[in-house]
Image (cartoon, grey):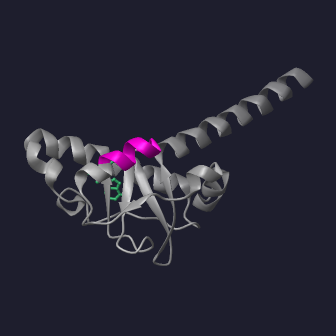
Amino acid sequence: MRIGTILQAKDTARRDVVTITPDAGVRELIALLAEHNIGALVVSVDGSRVDGIVSERDVVRHLHHDGTVIHNTVAAIMTAAVETCAPDDDLDEVMTTMTTRRFRHVPVLDGTTLVGIVSIGDVVKHKIGQLQFERDQLDSYVHQQ
Ligand code: AMP
C-alpha cells in the first residue's frame, strides 16, 4: 500500500495540513492544536516547504522543564530534522520508521512541496480496515464449503 492511497482515503477536511511559522508563539501553537483537534503541526515559513515539526509532546516536555516557554516561539521547541516520506513510499516502511523513531506524524512531500501528513491514527485505521477485509474473505471462504 502506497502513502498516496492513504492520503486519498482521508476525509477532505483532514487532508489539508495545518502549518505554523517558526516565529509564531507557543500560545498560538496550543490554540491551533486544540482548535483542529490534532497532535502536531508542520512548521513552515511559506506553507509549502517543511522547516520543522512540533507536536503536543514538545509542548508538554518543554513546559515541564521551564514554564516560561509559553512566552517563547515555536522555533524554540520544534524538531528541525524532520523525517518525511513521499506519496509513492510504502506504508509498511513508513510505519516501521514511526515505530522505531517513536513519532506519530510523518509529513508527505512531493519533491520539496508539502502535500499531506500521515499520522499513526491514519495508519491504524487503514490496518484495521485491511484486517476486517481479510477476516470477511476468510469468513465467506469457510461458509462456502
Ligand atoms: P509525536 O509522536 O508526533 O507527538 O512526536 C514526538 C516527538 O518527535 C516530538 O519531539 C516531535 O517534534 C518529533 N517528531 C514528530 N514527527 C516527526 C518527524 N516526522 N520527524 C522528526 N521528528 C518528529
**Residue 35 drawn in magenta:** yes
Residue at the far right in the pictured view? 144
Q: Residue at x 34, y 73 (%)?
A: 45
- Vertically, is 134 above or below 114? above
- Vertically, is 90 above or below 110? above
> Is residue 55 visible in the rendered structure shown here?
no
Foreground residue, 12 or 91? 12
Foreground residue, 117 or 130? 117
Q: Where the N terminus falls, by quadrant? A: bottom right
**Residue 77 drawn in magenta:** no
Q: Where the C terminus falls, by quadrant? A: top right
Specify whether 130 is left or right of 58: right
> Is residue 68 visible in the rendered structure shown here?
yes
Q: Position of residue 100 (x, y in %)?
A: 34, 49
Foreground residue, 85 or 134? 85
Q: Main secondary structure of the magenta part?
A: helix
Q: Which quadrant of the view contains residue 42? A: bottom left
Specify whether 39 is left or right of 127: left
Q: Residue at x 60, y 56 (%)?
A: 7
